[in-house]
Image (cartoon, rainbow, N blue to C red):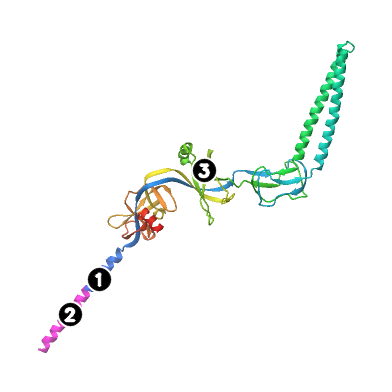
Amino acid sequence: MEISLFRSHFFALVILFGSFLASCSKGEEAGKKKMDNPSTPVTTVAVVQKNIPLIIHAVGNAESCRTVAIKAQVDGEITRAYVTDGQEVREKDPLFDLDDRRYRHRLAQLRANLDKDLAQLEQAHSKERRQTLLNKEKIASEENLASMVANRKMAEASVAADRAAIAEGELQLGFTRISAPIAGMTGRILMQPGNVVKANDTAPLVVINQMDPMCISFSVAEHHLASIRDNHAQAPLTLQVTSDREGIAPVPATLLSIDNAIDRQTASIRLKAQADNGKRRLWPGLFVSVELKLFDRPNALVIPAQAVQTGTKGIFVYVVKPDATVEQRSITLAQESKEEAVIDTGLNLGEMVVTVGQWRLKPGAKVETAKSKETDPEKKGQGDKK
């Protein structure tokens, strides 16, 4: 009786142990399968359709619309400087005075010559009149009258030359006061009082940059030229100018001109815009980002810019297929900003693209998706406002 009870317990233990081994084996097989084909967690967003303005992005720099290098137009010593480095000046504000004593003395001499020649002209007139009367009475010859007429004309010519010389002398004297030809900001004063300058010397006294308005120079790819010209012919194109400097709000500008030739080396065309700069948010030489709006692109396919990846064969996105695997899809972009990418080819409306977790993926990988809040841009915008 005891032996049979022992046997029954023994067989029960064997059966339990076998069941335990079987369950362990199944768990290992399931874990192995899970390890062989794991699911990668990613965030996805759907391709949406909306009206998008066609914007050309470019990098350019701010530059003065007018720059003047101030030079002396007469020789002389600088006796006074009215401006300092980096000073705002208005048009016709005085900048420098040159020693004018020589020009004043010269002008006084020219005026004295005029007085002398005016007296000689009066005398020539008197002689001519007297000779004319004698000629009428047949007392003097025609030859004498002709000589008197010639003397009078030479005296008139001398007076005219004196007056021209005086006008030149007054002009030279006026050049001893050097004034600002434009409104703007001075650079470093290169010539201080005491220095002697010469007319049209190579080195300027100071350079003035116009600060308002400010011009923006930038280049775009040549294939945009036709669209830019067509739209600009209809109405002046507007653009937004931004800078990396903190606290600088976007500055609106208007397209001013299109260059008359394409740069063959870069296959680009140079454009120039003009912006109001009363608040001095732009500075000559400042690098800026330019957004040139052409027209609205209706029903454009749009995805977040973070979904776009760059590989050896170009740009691509990971598309999640119905079986929860991903496909690496090559795409072309119509335009791209920091937040959105407008798809030209490669995607269809409603397809799900990966926005977070791409670095862990490869084609055919199994994924576990979580929809991004950016799936519906309008709702996202409303949430941000709240």
What is the residue that sits farthest to the bottom in this orientation? 2
Q: 122 or 158, which lies in front?
A: 122
Q: Is residue 71 magenta?
A: no
Q: Residues within 10 Å of mark 3 (few under 14, many from 20)?
A: some
* Mark 2 vs 3, N-terminal side: 2
Instruction: Determine whether label 3 and label 1 are within 8 Å by CB.
Output: no
Q: Residue 83 at what x, y percent from top left?
A: 70, 50
**Label 1 is placed on what type of residue?**
Gly
Residue 351 in view: yes
* Mark 3 vs 1, N-terminal side: 1
Q: Which residue is mark 3?
A: 254
Q: CA distance from mark 3 to mark 1?
A: 70 Å
Q: Which residue is mark 2?
A: 14
Q: Which residue is mark 1?
A: 27
Q: 221 or 209, which lies in front?
A: 209
Residue range of the region highlighted in magenta in the rendering: 1-22
Q: Residue at x 86, y 21 (%)?
A: 126
Left/right of residue 11 with respect to residue 190 in the rendered view: left
Q: Residue 106 at what x, y percent from top left?
A: 82, 37
**Label 2 is placed on what type of residue?**
Val
